[in-house]
Every structure is written in C-alpha cells, then in structure tokens.
Amino acid sequence: MKKIALVSVTLNAVNPMTRYLMQNAPDIEVRNYLDSQLLEHVRRDGKLTDASVGRMFHMLVQACVDGADGIILTCTIFSAHVNAFSQLLSVPIICPDGAMLDAVSKQSGKTAILCTFEGTVETTKNLYLSYCKKNGTSKQVDMIVVPGAYDAAEKGNMKLCNELILRMVEELDPEYDKIVLAQISMSEAINGYVAQHASVYTSPASAYQALTFLGV
C-alpha cells in the first residue's frame, strides 16, 4: 500500500484533501502532518521567514523519515519552495495549486483566481505567471480575495466561508472563462455547483493526478 503524507498548516486544507483521497484512492494510506501555528506566524510576519521555512522543512523531512512514498504540501504559501524542497528530499513533493495552475495556464480565456487569504495572492499570481511563461500562454489574470471568507474559516464557520466563496463564483461565472479556487481549503465550496459559463478549477484532483503521473 502506497503511503501519502499530507503536510499542512490548517485543518481547513487537510479535510478536503483527505476526503478526496479516501473517495478516489482507497488503496493508499494517508498520513497527516500539521503545524497549525505556522500560518499564524506567516500572517504575523507578513512574509515567509527563515523560521517559517524551517518549520515547514522539518515536517517534510519527518514525512520522508516515516516512509512516505509521496508528499502533498497543501499550503499555497510554500508553493514557490516546492522545487527546492524536492531537490533536497528523497520522495516526490506536489503542491496542489501548482499542478492545478499549470493545467489552467494551458487553456485559453479570461481567468480569475480566487483566494481567501491575502498572503497567498502574490505567491499564487507569480506561480501562475511562471506556468503561463512556460506554456507560452496569456499572462492576463485577475486576482480576487473573497471578502470575509478567511475570517469565517478562522472562527470555524466553514459553512459561511463556503457560502461566500460560492457566491463570488456565481457572480463571476458570466464574466470569466476560467475561475480558479487557489487554496485547497476552498475546494468543497462548489460541491454540487454547475457553472453556466466558466470552467471552475479546484486543486485536490490535480494533486492526485500529479502524484500518479510521477508513479506514486
């Protein structure tokens, strides 16, 4: 049985990814590594510091030591560091949003990327633009923070958080060809929703597909 480590900084990302894997890959063993204080440190500092990168790297190392066959790093803020982490460690590391953004960048049309956490906006935009450059596609993208969604999630009110995200998706649907939910914690907001115009992208499926592509 393959062992997949989920390395996270919030349960709001752990739960959607775990549920997706349990439903779509019942033959794998999911192991969770969580540092719930790390996101608060990044928010307080306003950026990634040596301390926060070190805490994340420690979790990744522990997952490798414990025998993981592959790692899904669910935290968008650290996506830009995945290649560097991968070069230092012995197993494949996938960032769900990276796999998703690569796929989105290959499709034509007007793009909106939604976030709930301000700290992910610049990282996500830069990552998306890097894939656009690699794939030779348009770099035009609108970055949108869903008002109130992060505060609702922090208070444990995921129902309200998801309602706010879905409301924004419904509002943007007629205006965009591609709507991207940047963070894995946002993925369940559109369960059951059928878009009228836009293609709506979430990251759990992209992460799993990327791991299987790597043979994990």
Image: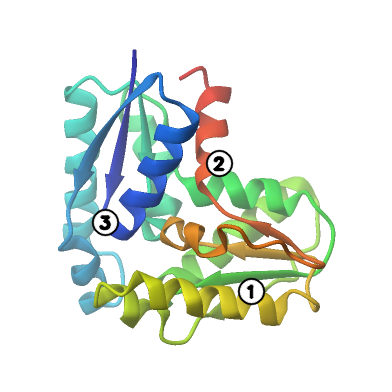
Q: CA distance from mark 3 to mark 2?
A: 18 Å
Q: CA distance from mark 2 to mark 1?
A: 19 Å
Residue 55 at what x, y percent from top left? 17, 51
What residue is shown at x 17% (from left), y 42% (from top)? Answer: 58
In the picture, the disc for residue 11 is 3
Residue at 50% from the left image edge and 80% from the top image edge: 164
The answer to whether mark 3 and mark 2 are in CB contact below 8 A is no
For the residues bearing labels 2 and 1, Cβ distance under 8 angstroms:
no
Pick out the residue farthest to the bottom.
Answer: 147
Give percent across and percent down for residue 8.
Answer: 28, 50
In the displayed structure, 2 sits above or below 72; it is: above
The answer to which of 91 and 199 lies nearer the viewer is: 199
Coloration mode: rainbow
Kind of element beneath mark 3: helix
Closer to the camera, 102 or 86?
102
Badge 2 crowding class, 10 Å Cα cut-off, few under 14, some 14 to 19, many 20 or more, is some
Q: Amino acid at mark 2?
A: Ala
Counting from the top left corner in percent of width and height, residue 215 is at 51, 17
Residue type, numbered disc 3: Leu
Residue 37 against residue 93 in the figure, above or below: below
Where residue 205 is drawn, which disc sits there? 2
- For this view, does 114 lie left or right of residue 154? right
Q: Position of residue 61 (x, y in %)?
A: 20, 33
The disc at residue 169 is 1
Q: Secondary structure at mark 2?
A: helix
Q: Residue furthest top?
A: 1
Q: Quadrant of the C terminus?
A: top left
Q: Residue furthest front?
A: 192
